[in-house]
Amino acid sequence: MLITYFTNLFLLLKLSEAVSRNLAYLCLLCIIILLSLVVKFIFKHFLVKLLHSFIKQTATKWDDIFVENNVPGRVTLIIPAVVIFCFVDLLFPVKSSGVINLIHLICLIYIIIICVVITDSVLNSIVQIYHQAEKTSHAPVKSFAQMLKVIIVFVALVIIISMLMNKSPWTLLKALGALTAVSMLVFKDSILGLVASIQLSAQKMVRKGDWITMPKFDADGDVVDISLTTVKVQNFDKTIVSVPTYALVSNSFQNWRGMTKSGGRRIKRSINLDINSFKFLDKDDINRLKIFEYLGGYLTNKLEELSAHNKKFNVNADDSTINGRKLTNIGTFRYYVEQYLRHNNKISDNMTFLVRQLQPTEKGLPLQIYVFTNDTNWVNYEEIQSDIFDHLLTAIPEFGLSVYQDPTGLDFRKIYKS
């Protein structure tokens, strides 16, 4: 019985010693954690604020972007783990190597995660700085940054899993080789987006700020963002359309950048003239049209040219309607349209300039105007185009011409009344 008593007492002493030792370890760990938080507090509330105030006083703008993305603040998140990792060996005895290894593992995993977060902020800052540069603002670097983020996160996950499994990262990567097909399926959009981004950038197919038209996706507006997987287009009705990046490579789309750079925007519109209103001009018509701007000198010179031609071939144009060469109202109107556009200071003289007749149809004879304005702004362009056709459509009756128009209800009522 006495032996049992001493045995229990010995075990109790051992247990109390173990409890005291574990309690001491816990207290030491709390002290280390408290020390790390104090160091972090000093860095964050004193040194980082001092750095922020210094950066605000500098003339450069790129450092302000790093502050805006909270890069210095995220760097301070590493400090507690670094302090704990460095001091835990000094405070714990050698016998506690298992506890030390566990704390080291937790600290390393935490540091890797924070490094990924810091890298994310740094990349965001670099992309923002890159976009603000005038010469490089159109390059789609955001997609490259996003792909780099995916790679960094993947590498970090592989390292963390290998640490938890106590295996080499290369061994883990070999094991993941069997999942290549699944990985390709999961990251299909990212891979296609990366390839498409490289093609878009290398061939300069589309840039941020370009006006593109892609009917398949109901996209007709300005490119506001180019990312790894999508290109965002703000339509002119202010709606946002997301187009897959690889769709811009695999499908056809229209980029209006060339028009913007050229400084001219095309007007290509026809007026359908009623063929029944075409006629030769008589003397009264010619005298009346001579008072119109741009036509006085033309009609005089043209009459001399036609008279000389008819005399040369001994043709009396007065004997018949179609004998010899005569002036027509459609030809005179075509010349008037050309001169009217030539004297319009909003029409470019350095680009294609055509006033031509197209193939006659059941809708009459299309007289096409094919010119370029010297203003590419959409609102100004529409105003210039409208002013031109306001004038021409109103001036057509002065030449004895009429615009072709399908019969309307009013026309049928006039016929019925007559």
Image (cartoon, grey):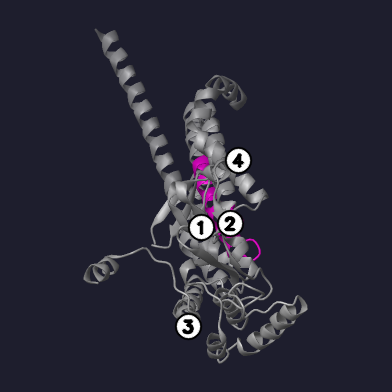
> Tag 2: residue type?
Arg
Which is in the foreground here, disc 1 or disc 4? 1
Q: Which residue is mark 3?
A: 398
In which image quadrant can residue 314 be found? Answer: bottom right
Give the number of the disc on residue 223: 1
The residue that appears at 52% across and 64% down in the rendered structure is 366
Q: Is residue 133 magenta?
A: yes
Q: How far apart are the two marked residues, 1 and 2, measured between alpha carbons?
A: 7 Å
> In the picture shown, does residue 26 fall above or below 331?
above
Question: Which residue range is magenta in the image?
Answer: 111-140
Is there CB contact under 8 Å for labels 2 and 4? no
Q: Nearer the viewer, residue 276 or 99?
A: 276
Split into 4 quadrants, where in the image is the N terminus? top left
Is there CB contact under 8 Å for labels 1 and 2? yes
> The residue tagged with tag 4: helix, strand or loop?
helix
The residue that appears at 48% across and 81% down in the rendered structure is 395
Q: Looking at the image, is mark 3 or mark 1 earlier in the sequence? A: 1
Q: How far apart are the two marked residues, 3 and 2, measured between alpha carbons?
A: 49 Å
Which is in the foreground here, disc 3 or disc 2? 3
Q: How far apart are the two marked residues, 1 and 4, measured between alpha carbons?
A: 19 Å
Give the number of the disc on residue 195: 4
Q: How far apart are the two marked residues, 2 and 4, measured between alpha carbons?
A: 16 Å
Give the number of the disc on residue 207: 2
Q: Looking at the image, is mark 1 or mark 2 earlier in the sequence? A: 2
| Main secondary structure found in the magenta portion | helix
> Tag 3: residue type?
Glu
Q: Residue 70, image x and y in percent?
A: 49, 58
